[in-house]
Image: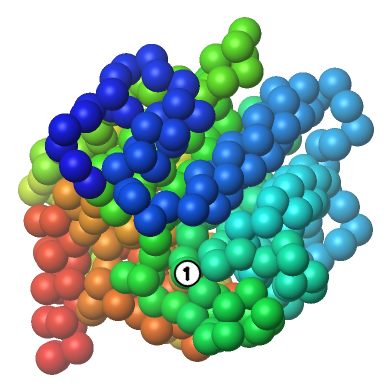
Amino acid sequence: MSKSSNKHMEKGIDLRRHIAITQREYPNATGEFSQLLGQITLAGKIVSREVNRAGLGDILGKSKNENVHGERQARLDLYANAVFTRSLIHNGGICIIGSEEESDPIHVRKPELRGKYVVTIDPLDGSSNIDYNVSIGTIFGIYRKKTPGGVEKAATVEDLLQPGKDLVAAGYIIYGSSTMLVYTAGDNVYGFTLDDSLGEFLLSYPKITMPQREGYLSVNESNFKSWSAGAQKAVKEFRENGDYTSRYVGSCVADFHRNLLSGGIFLYPPEPKVVGKGEGKLRLLYEAAPLAYIMEQAGGAASDGYRRILEKQPEHLHQKTPFYVGNKKAVKKIEQYLREEDQG
C-alpha cells in the first residue's frame, strides 16, 4: 500500500469511506473485496441489533437442532448463520461459503453471481453465553478461489481447505458493551466501533499492535487435569513466575479481543477426556486460522503447540485444533514445554 495517503487511518472515519480510500491504493482492484466487506458489516449490524434486544424477543435459549459437532444450536446461532449466509451468497463477490453451523459448503450456484472470493465464518462464537448477556462475536476469513476456470467453474471444497497463510483478510465482530469490527487485509489491524445513532462503523483503533507484556492469562483451568504435562507446566509457570492476571470469559472472541488490546495469552490445549486425544475444541477454519492471522498482523503469535496455526493444512471442513495465541514469548514457552514433554 502506498504511504502517500493516510486518510483511511484517520480516527472517526466511517468504514465505507475507509474502504473506498484504501481501494484507490490498488490500481487493479475491482471492488469485489470492498463489496464483500460491506456485506459482512451489514450483516453484523443486523445481528448486533438482535443481540441487543434478545431478551425482548423469542430468540434466547436452545433450538431443537444440533450442528455438525453434535452441539445444540442456540436460536441466535441459527439466526446469525441465516443472516450472514444470505447476505454473502447474494453479494456477487464470493463463490463458496464454509460455516461452522453447516455440515456442507454453501455454493453460489449461478455463475453470474459468483466472484473470486471464498469465505469461512463462525456466525456466532460464544453462543453458550448468549442467555447471560456476555460478549459474543462473529469470526470470518476471506481467501481467493483456487479452482481454475473463473466464475464459470464452480468452486469445490478444496477452495475452503486452504491454510491460514493464504488468507486475504480476516476479522471479527464483537457484540458487547459496544459493537466493534476488527479486521486486517494483511497490512494493518483496524478497529471500528458501531455508532448506533449513525448506523455506521467508525474507526476507533487506527493501528492495533498487541502489547508484548505478559498481561492476561486466559484459559479454562477447570480442565487442568485433562491437559498434557507440558501444557500444565506452562500454565503453572505463567501463574507462579509470570506477571499475569487470570481472566477467562469463555467466549473466544471476547478473550482474544481483550488480550489483543492489552496483552496476554489465550490457551485451549487438547483435552482428551473432553474432545478426543490430540484435538482441541476450536475449529481450525472458522476460529483459529482467522484469529491467528489477525494476531500475527498485530505482532503476536499463534500455534498449535508445535507449529504456526497459519501453516496447518486443513484436512476437512470442521477440523479442530489446539490453540495458543498471544505474545510471542509466551507462545514460544508453550512450544518449548510441549517439545520437552515429547522428548521425555
Relative depth, front residue between 212 and 70: 212
Please report the residue visible at 40 percent of the width from the left and 19 percent of the height from the top.
13
Indicate the position of residue 299 as horizontal and vertical percent values.
17, 49
Relative depth, front residue between 339 and 114: 114
* Quadrant of the rendering where the C terminus is positioned: bottom left
Residue 56 occupies quadrant: top right
Q: Amino acid at mark 1?
A: Arg
Query: Is residue 113 visible to us here?
Result: yes
Residue assigned mark 1: 144
Q: As displayed, is residue 341 above or below residue 280?
A: below
Please report the residue visible at 45 percent of the width from the left and 78 percent of the height from the top.
162
Q: Left or right? Give the position of 235 relative to 310.
A: left
Indicate the position of residue 201 as horizontal and vertical percent values.
51, 24
Residue 73 occupies quadrant: bottom right
Relative depth, front residue between 56 and 185: 185
Q: As displayed, is residue 157 above or below residue 6?
A: below
Q: How is the image coloured?
A: rainbow
Relative depth, front residue between 335 and 184: 184
Q: Left or right? Give the position of 178 relative to 132.
A: left
Q: Residue furthest top?
A: 197
Q: Secondary structure at mark 1?
A: strand
Query: Is residue 269 visible to us here?
Result: no
Please report the residue visible at 50 percent of the width from the left and 29 percent of the height from the top.
16
Indicate the position of residue 264 as horizontal and vertical percent values.
23, 43
Indicate the position of residue 225 as horizontal and vertical percent values.
39, 68
Callout 1: 10 Å neighbours few (<14), some, many (20+)? some
Q: As displayed, is residue 336 above or below residue 213?
A: below
